[in-house]
Every structure is written in structure tokens, then in C-alpha cells.
Image: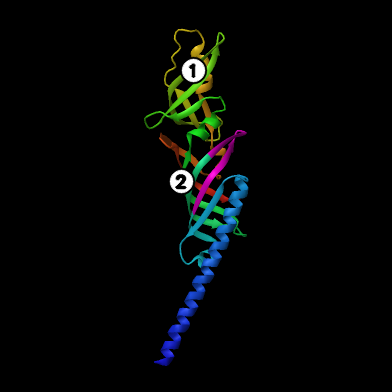
Amino acid sequence: MRALRIVVIIGVVLGAVFVGLDRLAVTYVEGRLADRIQARQGLGGSSEVEIRGFPFLTQALSHDLERVDLKLRGVDVMADGRKTRLSELDASFHDVKLNGDYGGGTARRAEGTGLITYADLTAASQTGATLSYGGAPGKVRVTAAVDVLGKTLTRHVVSTITLVDAQDGKGGKLVRVRADEVPGEGIPGVEKLIRKKTDFDRSLDGGMPAGLQLSSLTSDETGVHLTLGGSNVAVAGS
């Protein structure tokens, strides 16, 4: 009986040691991935990585991870030389093949969501227009001012925000904002002047992890919500 008790105690201790080592190892790799992602995105914002599945050590030895969850907050996406800030970007990477130094890898598939606030969308427009919720999904309210014959005209228009194919031959997507209607009050050229400030396109694909692409978007009171997905998606710096 005493021998059985000793065996049980040893088993419990070894199990606890294994779990402890497993958690230390997963924390180390999560930190490396987060640091690499942080470096890739620049100094701004924050990144958090969580590796799913237990035990981790057996996954690490084979360099194959079941799932890696990524949370980015307040990061800048650069595309076409322009900066667009994402308030949130959450992604899940499945069947990840790690590289040799555990600082990156490639996921067989991935999906995620993102959020661009209206303040950040206003900054991304780079036209001086102000954007807010348009009162319905897929709609935004755009306020713009133009000078006509020495007078400043301010117009509020409801615009449709959509996702369209980029004409660059690379299969990317553009976030497009177009005013549904612009009141011109019969003044020649006013609509054209207003649209120069209210209508714009922005590419985001170039700043996403390689292989992760926009698939749809919509809007609500909090901002513009993005849906993303892809296959053979790069995790961190790989």
C-alpha cells in the first residue's frame, strides 16, 4: 500500500512538472511570436498571441500547432504608401507549421475580423472629410466642405461603403466609399468638388499577414467591421 502511495505521489509530481514545463514552453513561443508580429507592425499598438491545444511540447517538437489566436490592438496597416489604423484585428490560424526558430510559421487556413473606427477612417480618407455612421449597415455619413465662388459650402451625404476588387492584377481588395447622392443646388461643378472629398478607395490587403485577405465588410455605430480569411497564411515574420 505504501509503495502504491509513493508511485501515485511520484506520478503527480512528474505530471505537475510536465505541465509546468509545458506552460513555460508555450509562454516562450507565444512571446516570440508576439514580438515578431509587433516588429512587423512597427512600434505602435499591441499584440497578444495564444497557442491552443495541449500538450504544447508535443506540438512544438513536431513544429505543428493546432491553432494560434492573434489579437492586435491599435496597429497601423500600410498599403500603397498610406497608413490606415485598425482599432482591432483578431485572427485564428489553423494547422500552423512553425519555422526553425519558433518566430513564425505558415497556417493552412485562417479567418479573422477587424474594426476601423470612424475617427481612423476619417484620417484614412486624407481628403478633409469627416465620417460617421450612416444609420444602416453598409452606410456611412460623410461631411465635407468646399469653397465655391468665395463661399464655403458644407454638405452631409450618406455614402455606401463596399469591398471591390482592386485593378492591380494581384487579386487584392479595395475599401470603397461613394456618396449615394450629392445635393448641388444647381451650382455647376459643386457635385464634382464635393465628391473629390467624399469619395475614395483604400487598399488594406498589403498590410495584412501574407495570405490573409478581406472577404466582406459592414458598418454600425462603432465603425466599419471587416471579415478576413485565407489559406497558406503567414504567421508573424515568415
Q: How is the image coloured?
A: rainbow
Residue at image point 56% right, 49% down: 46
Q: Main secondary structure of the magenta part?
A: strand
- The residues tagged by marks 1 and 2 sit, at their Cα atoms, a distance apart of 38 Å
- The range drawn in magenta is 69-85
- Where residue 182 appears, as percent x and y from the top left, is 44, 17
Asked if the magenta segment contains residue 166, the reply would be: no
Q: Nearer the viewer, residue 146 or 176?
A: 146
Up-down: is 230 above or below 62? above
Residue at image point 54% right, 43% down: 74
Q: Earlier in the sequence, mark 1 or mark 2?
A: 2
Taking the image as drawn, is residue 173 in sight? no
Up-down: is 144 above or below 79? above
Q: Quadrant of the N terminus?
A: bottom left
Residue at image point 53% right, 21% down: 197
Q: Residues within 10 Å of mark 2 (few under 14, many from 20)?
A: many
Up-down: is 85 above or below 180? below
Asked whether the beta carbons under mark 1 and mark 2 sit within 8 Å of each other, the answer is no
The residue under label 2 is which amino acid type?
A: Gly
Q: Mark 1 — residue?
A: 154
The residue under label 1 is which amino acid type?
A: Thr
Q: Residue furthest left?
A: 136
Taking the image as drawn, is residue 40 in sight? yes
Up-down: is 13 above or below 114? below
- Where residue 124 appears, as percent x and y from the top left, is 55, 31
Mark number, residue 112: 2
